[in-house]
Image (spheres, helix red, strand yellow):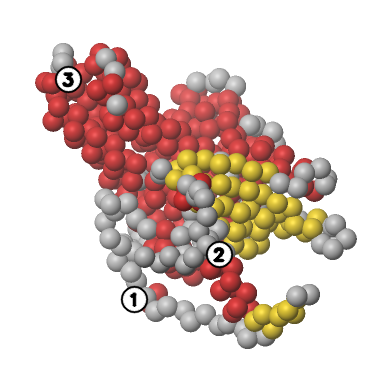
């Protein structure tokens, strides 16, 4: 029975992809659609990608899928405590949608004005909303670094990848919004209104649809699969990453308030040039002013250090995760190119540098090889070189003033 249902769900999505109107599909498969669950939709979409349907194609047609599945999905209710990571994310969804609503209301006023001077107060409020949208980045980082790896651990890999693609679209739209309102005085007012109109239309399309898919498919699937212990650990990592300034403070469940005491082995590790205890090794790695991530021969994340000012977020949920799943889909081909060149022995370094928050970030990848040249994995080294880049001349004396 379950196998027949899976075949029917797969046939539904294939027919939608071929252009069959949603109304015809709903009529033909009405009995099946009455009992479909979020987890079943997630698994079928995953199977289709494995069978060759491009992620990009599936992502584009997700809205059509929802036109068919939404009636049943709307019946899904999620009852969770206020401290729960999913509850936190869903409450943030409400706040972000409220921001979007205010954006639309203010823009309606702005587009009716003939001159910028007539709507300076509204532009100021739009700038504040743009800053809130920018601050919402922690929402997406918590999903990508905590929820997505946990789903992948339980066998759900493709839906998170599709959601990450949508995250990048949201990022592009909110970045454009912020730049438009910041530079409004540098452009013609009428041109500004045309650009902001397109930006609002894009955000007002992708954000509500994206949140609907998460609330009704991704999150219910996660609640079915992820264990209580994993959710408690997820909350700890949520707290480490931090929250948006509009996030309602979560109520921490009493049973997970106590910190777990970490056991540190005092056994010594002997190296060719000396020996260190495990505690010393970990402290040294965490004291370095760089971020380190090590990926093994199977492309799985095996270790990362916890430097005091880590640049890119890493959580314990990524341990054992394929490194390809730790990057947006648009850059996976670059990751594979680097790894393949290291494994083949053709390259010994890959380096990039980007500007982020006014800082210059230097990112390097190195192959890790054993004494006889055997490939053991790849190490990523990330460093903020903003101050290093400013160095001139010499300093030979200690100066702590």
Residue at position x 29%, y 36% in the image: 130
Q: Which is closer to the viewer, label 2 or label 3?
A: 2
Q: Which residue is mark 2?
A: 288
State whether residue 368 is above or below residue 12.
below
For the residues labelled 2 and 3, the Cα–Cα distance comes to 50 Å
Residue 140 x/y as whole percent = 43, 47
Q: Which mark is residue 56?
A: none
Residue at position x 52%, y 28% in the image: 60
Q: How many marks?
A: 3
State whether residue 136 is above or below residue 55.
below
Q: Quadrant of residue 159?
A: top right
Does residue 327 appear in the picture of this structure? yes
Tell which circle, 3 or 1, labels the residue nearer the N-terminal end: 3
Residue 317 x/y as whole percent = 55, 60
Mark 2 secondary-structure assignment: loop
| Nearer-the-camera pick, 356 or 141 | 356
User: The C terminus is located in which quarter?
Assistant: bottom left
Asked whether, in this view, residue 224 is left or right of residue 211, the answer is right
Which residue is the extreme one toward the left?
118
Does residue 32 appear in the picture of this structure? no
Residue 100 x/y as whole percent = 28, 35
Mark 1 secondary-structure assignment: helix
Residue at position x 66%, y 62% in the image: 302
Residue at position x 33%, y 46% in the image: 135
Q: Which mark is residue 116?
A: 3
Q: Which residue is mark 1?
A: 254
Tell which circle, 2 or 1, labels the residue nearer the N-terminal end: 1
């Amino acid at each position: 029975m379950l196998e027949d249902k899976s075949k029917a769900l797969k046939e539904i999505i294939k027919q939608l992809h071929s252009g069959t109107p949603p109304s015809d599909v709903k009529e033909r498969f009405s009995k099946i659609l009455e009992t479909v669950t979020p987890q079943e939709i997630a698994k079928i979409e995953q199977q289709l990608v494995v069978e060759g349907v491009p992620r990009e194609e599936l992502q584009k047609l997700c809205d059509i899928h929802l036109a068919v599945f939404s009636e049943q999905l709307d019946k899904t209710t999620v009852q969770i405590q206020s401290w729960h990571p999913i509850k936190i994310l869903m409450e943030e969804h409400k706040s972000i949608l409220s921001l979007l609503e205010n954006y639309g209301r203010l823009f309606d006023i702005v587009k009716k004005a003939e001159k910028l001077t007539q709507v300076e107060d509204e532009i100021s409020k739009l700038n504040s909303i743009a800053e809130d949208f920018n601050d919402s980045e922690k929402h997406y980082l918590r999903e990508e670094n905590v929820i997505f790896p946990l789903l992948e651990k339980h066998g759900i890999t493709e839906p998170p990848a599709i959601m990450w693609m949508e995250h990048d679209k949201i990022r592009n739209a909110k970045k454009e919004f912020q730049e438009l309102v910041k530079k409004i005085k540098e452009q013609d007012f009428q041109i500004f209104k045309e650009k902001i109109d397109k930006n609002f239309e894009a955000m007002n399309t992708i954000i509500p649809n994206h949140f609907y898919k998460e609330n009704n498919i991704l999150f219910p699937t996660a609640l079915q699969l992820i264990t209580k212990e994993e959710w408690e650990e997820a909350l700890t990592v949520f707290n480490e990453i931090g929250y948006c300034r509009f996030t309602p403070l979560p109520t921490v469940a009493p049973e997970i308030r106590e910190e777990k005491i970490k056991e540190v082995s005092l056994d010594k590790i002997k190296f060719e040039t000396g020996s260190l205890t495990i505690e010393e090794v970990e402290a040294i790695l965490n004291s370095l002013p760089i971020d380190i991530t090590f990926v093994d021969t199977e492309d799985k994340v095996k270790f990362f250090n916890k430097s005091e000012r880590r640049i890119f977020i890493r959580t314990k949920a990524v341990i054992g995760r394929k490194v390809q799943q730790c990057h947006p889909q648009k850059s996976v081909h670059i990751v594979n190119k680097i790894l393949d060149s290291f494994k083949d022995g053709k390259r010994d370094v890959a380096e990039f540098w980007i500007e982020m928050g006014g800082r210059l970030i230097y990112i390097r990848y190195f192959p890790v090889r054993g004494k006889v040249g055997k490939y053991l994995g790849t190490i990523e080294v990330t460093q903020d070189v903003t101050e290093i880049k400013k160095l001139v001349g010499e300093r030979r004396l200690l100066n702590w003033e």
